[in-house]
Amino acid sequence: MNHVLVRYSSIGTKSRPVQKRMRAVLRQRVQDRMEYEDIDYEKVSTDHGRIIVKTSSAEEAAENVSELPGVASASPALKTGADMESIKVASEEFEYGDTFGIDANRAGKHDFSSQDVKVELGSYVEDFTGATVDLDNPDTLLEADIRNDDAYLFTERVKGPGGLPVGSQGSLAALVSGGIDSPVAAYQVMKKGADIVPIYFYNKPIAAEDHLLRFHASLEKLRRFNPGKNWEYYVIDMEEVNKELRGVGKGRMLLHRIVMFRVAEKIAEKEGVKGIVTGESLGQKSSQTATNLELTSQEVGKPIYRPLLGLDKNEIVARAKKLGTFKEATIDSACSTLAPEKPSTRMNGGVLGELKTEVDIEGLVEKAFETRDKHVLGNRKD
């Protein structure tokens, strides 16, 4: 195989100007991934609803680019001329099972139809292989994707995640702890086209350095979906905040969350991003009941995106395993240690207001914000 055909779905539902812009973004993401994985290629281009990669490592390339948000599927393909004779000759390069089927589609003007290709190519393959035609469940399905002067033949489609290419929907600040939930939440918005500015709240003295390493491991996994950018992230030292909040009983976790949200909002404003992403799931923790989510959401002006809100824990775990972040998320989270024995699940807004005054929430936010340290993820691929 000498090419990869990359298909998209959601992009195709947009207006023509938007499609053009998003295709350009996806083409760049594909090229970035090829370079990140050190896969040799000659060219990455667009052609009539496809991203096309010219490469001598088509199988490896298809497996990699199929992971990118925005990709519906990718196929290692053999390029040939868009005439029936060239297509027939190229079909001899494939291995066939006992049964086979043919499918074809065209873009451009030709002196034959897609049905003509199915019939003539099917007859040709049947003659030189001796295999039996099975249109319902063949051992081998040979497909011909014909685009103007070129034809691409393939027998495999590597399924992609769909969605939109990362960066096509602007950027969001993402609270990433390196635990099970938050990397999945970050990925979910990336899948819908948003880039992310990761923020890690380092819960000293509760959290050990292992927690920070776990965060870095999560970023390495997320970087695969937009590897061409300069991956900048923030680390916030929460030691002074946590020392102050240890003296609070019920309401401690909400105050902790408010500090995080307000610091994240300040960073979002500094970076010019449009909102904040969290891994919260309804009812999963005391701070994530409907009542408490309402209270914490009211503390910031930026929208808070919670892509995992309606998912059960087992669903989130399954997604973390598929994403590849679950293995690193085995250390107990800092929040489970910081939480009081009897946290409030239905905090009264008036009581929360009094607690905010008692602890000087504005002062805590400023203390935390002043500790912000901006880093760049190394260029090394693990």
Image (spheres, grey):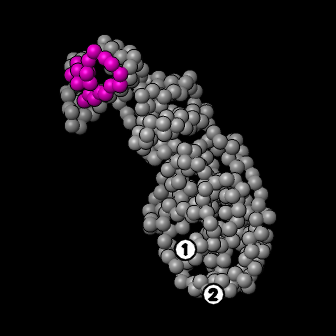
Q: Is mark 1 on a helix, strand or loop?
A: helix
Residue sitting at 69 percent across and 58 percent down?
Answer: 269
Please give left or right for residue 282 compared with residue 127 in the image.
right
Reading the image, the residue beneath label 2 is: 351
Reading the image, the residue beneath label 1 is: 293
Please give left or right for residue 362 compared with residue 192 in the image.
right
Mark 1 surroundings within 10 Å by alpha-carbon count, few (fewer than 14), some (14 through 19), many (20 or more): many
Tag 2 or tag 1, which sits nearer the N-term? Answer: 1
Q: Report if residue 356 lies within the magenta region.
A: no
Residue 174 screen position, x and y as percent: 61, 58
Residue 120 screen position, x and y as percent: 23, 18
The amino acid marked with disc number 1 is Leu
As measured in the structure, the alpha-carbon distance from the residue carrying label 1 to the one carrying label 2 is 15 Å
Mark 2 surroundings within 10 Å by alpha-carbon count, few (fewer than 14), some (14 through 19), many (20 or more): few
Residue sitting at 31 percent across and 27 percent down?
Answer: 105
Q: Is mark 2 on a helix, strand or loop?
A: helix
The amino acid marked with disc number 2 is Val
Residue sitting at 33 percent across and 19 percent down?
Answer: 109
Query: Which of 323 and 199 lies nearest the eye of the viewer?
Result: 199
Q: Report if residue 111 lies within the magenta region.
A: yes
Which mark identifies residue 205?
none
Asked which quadrant contains residue 134, the reply is top left
Which portion, as a residue range, is magenta? 100-121
> Can residue 349 be seen in this snapshot?
yes
Residue 323 screen position, x and y as percent: 51, 52
Residue sitting at 54 percent across and 74 percent down?
Answer: 293
Does 247 sit above or below residue 15? below
